[in-house]
Structures are given as C-alpha cells and as structure tokens.
Amino acid sequence: MIGISKLYCGTVEPSDALRYGRSSSNLPSHLLQFSLDKKPVVVWNITRQCNLKCVHCYAHAKSTPVDDELSTSDGIKLIDDLAHFGAPVLLFSGGEPLMRKDLPELAGYAVTKGMRAVISTNGTLITEQAAKTLKEIGLSYVGISIDGMEDINDRFRGVRGAFNSALDGIRNCMTAGIKVGLRFTINKKNFLEIPRIFKLLEEMEIPRVCFYHLVYAGRGSTLIEEDLTHEETRSAVDTIIDHTQQLHDKGKEKEVLTVDNHSDGPYLYMRLLKENPARAREVLELLKMNEGNNSGRGIGCISWNGDVHADQFWRHYSFGNIKKRPFSEIWADVSNPLMKQLKEKKKYVKGRCASCRWLDICAGNFRVRAEAITGDVWAPDPACYLTDQEISEQ
C-alpha cells in the first residue's frame, strides 16, 4: 500500500510516524503502514456468498451460502485471539460481508476489544438503516468497490444497477457519519476511467480512494491478459499522481493510495527526485518504514471456513485452521517453511528482484503473481514495471 497523497503531496512527514513510536497499537489508521512491529492487519472473509458476479473476484464468490462458514461463536473466539495478539485492524470482507446477518454483532465486538473494524463491500446493500447500525457499532471505515462509471462498473459486477446502488450506499454512509472510500481495481478495460473516478471523489466529497493493481488469483487469474502493460501501468500511476496533486492544489485533499504493486514506491520517489529532491529524501525515509509487501507478516487473511492465508490472494495455501489452533499461534509458527520465508522474503527472491536496489522498500513485490505466471513463488513479479536501468545501482 503506497500512500500517494501522503508521499507526493507531503501530507505526512517521517516525524509523524516516529512521534507514536511506530507501534501498531498507538499509530492512527493513516500511519499504520509505517509501523515498526508489523502486527498483522487481518482480512476476514466472513462469507463466500455475494449478491453480485464480479469477473475479477479473488474469492470465487457464489450466490448461495456455503456450509462451512465460521459460526458467530467461532468469530467471537477469533476476535478475542486477534485482540490479545495485538492485530490493530480487522477488515471484514467476503464475498459480500453484509450478506451475513451477524456482521454488526461481530464488528461491534471487535470494536469493544479495542480493534479498528472496517469493511470491504460492494456497497449495494448499505441501506440508510444499515449505515446507521454500522455507525452505532463504531465501524471505522467502509471501502466500497467501483470499477468505473455505470456501464463499465455494471459489466464488471455482472448486475445491472450495481453502480447506482453502490452510490446510494456511499451516500448513506456519509449521511450516517461513517468514513467511506472507493476501491478500484485497475485493468485494460477501465484504466482510462481513472480521471472520472477522481471527478466522482470531488463531486461527492468522498475522502479516500484505493487503486488496486490486478492480482492473478481467484477469478482474477483468468484476467491475466487484461492486466496493463508496463507502459500502461506507468501511465496509470502518473495519472493517479497528477490528479491527486490537482485536488490538493485546489484545497480538496483526498487520501489516495495504490495497492498491490510496490513498484509504485520507487517510481514515485524517482519522479520526485526530478521535481522536488528535498521531499524525495523524506519520501525515501517513509518508504523504508513501509518496507514494501507484507504478505505473511503485516497482513494476513482468514477464510470463511477458518483457514489462515498469507493474504487474501493466497487461498491455494493454508497454514492451518483457527478451529484447530488460534490464529496467533499459526501466524507465529515459523516451523512452516513458507511462513518462515515470508517473514524474511528478501532473502529468497530470485532474478532481478534479488539484485534490485529497491528491495528494502519493495520486499520483492507480490509473490502470488510470480507464482501464477512462472510456477515459482520466488521468481520476479511480472507486474514490476521498473526498467533494468531503474533497478540497478547508480
């Protein structure tokens, strides 16, 4: 996760994170990526059921419920363990998390245990009453997925009317006083929509947007040919940076992040080095604090059946199940070779990643993409768009 607005527009300084001691338990949400202890943000896919049919769903969500979902009591035990372990954030996802009737109970319980509860949703089920309920339980944030304007979004979502229903969900969250933001997965069919997403942010006064690079997992594994070329990716990132700065200059500051491609960090730094060398030095310090990809370390995932994964895209590999062992034990158990390697992945990456001068601030980028293309989890990430010259020593 690369905070474009934080880094490029100077809304965060290195001293901001240092002031809190860089402890996950003390850092406010917008600074968590700079924590020192890297206590995992945990994504809990509480259901596989969904009311939409998104073509890029990493969870292979279904319209009908599955039989092996964790029960409410299982969820309470899980939250107790996560809170004791020190996980700062529990992100409820799916499928569509609002398909589970006990979502408010579970999220509310996480809040009472001192965690920040957030949800990732398609937004279509957030009625006025649902938004009020989510506000009452103390939900910190709602991320609503949109893949472009109406026609493109509804084509991706597989249901006509999904776009307008999602906008209603955004309005209902804002009326209820819940912080809300957009989630946008970049691909060939929608990257030209990025300026229109920024226009939507401005017009609706939405405070946050996360632009996700495509990960080849779940139904997303069938869209490899729809991923951007390296040149298209560079253009998309430049567009995101430029529009973030334009809003900042207009006094309409938005929190803008890119997710799932840590090449964005060095790319932004090298751009700043030409434009504002003093700020570039500060950005480099912040990127070193960020430490790049944190799958298996600073982010983890629990599936609807209790399986523990390195992140939400690693469903083909489980480290164990919370019905048999607590998440905290599974996460800390480095007797599993892959878990041990993920905790210190910079030692194991191969090829151009191993000699890359940005390894300390990228950590080898996304291993799932490398495995999807080459069959080798430690091969270079094919979505790294930095040139050989840019990654070599200077």
Image (spheres, grey):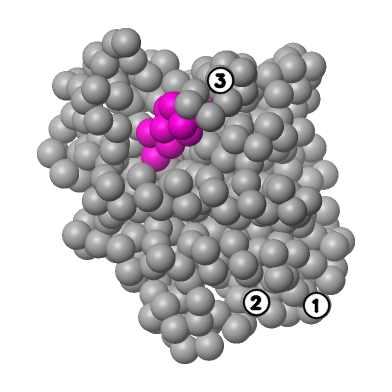
**Quarter residue 334 falls in:** top left
Q: Earlier in the sequence, mark 3 or mark 2?
A: 2
At label 2, which amino acid type do we have?
Answer: Leu
Question: How far from the left and from the top, in percent, is residue 273?
Answer: 49, 23
Q: Which of marks 2 and 1 is nearer the N terminus?
A: 1
Name the residue: 48% across, 62% down: 194
Over which residues does the magenta segment extend?
A: 261-272
**One can see residue 111 in this view:** yes
Q: Horizontal placement of 319 versus 150: left or right? A: left
Q: Residue at x 29, y 21 (%)?
A: 391
Q: In this view, does 320 lie above or below 258?
A: above
Badge 3 element: helix
> Residue 285 at x, y = what percent?
57, 16
3D distance between C-alphas at marks 3 and 2? 40 Å
Q: Is the magenta stretch mostly helix, strand or loop?
A: helix
Disc 3 and disc 1: Cα gap in Å? Answer: 49 Å
Q: Residue furthest bottom?
A: 160
Q: Report the disc number at residue 277.
A: 3
- The disc label shown at residue 129, or none: 1
The alpha-carbon separation of the residues under discs 2 and 1 comes to 16 Å
Q: Looking at numbered disc 3 in the image, what kind of residue is underneath it?
A: Pro
Q: Position of residue 2 (x, y in %)?
A: 53, 37
Say if residue 117 shows up in the picture: no
Name the image quarter holding residue 186: bottom left
Q: How many marks?
A: 3
Location of the C terminus by quadrant is top left
Q: Which mark is residue 167?
A: 2
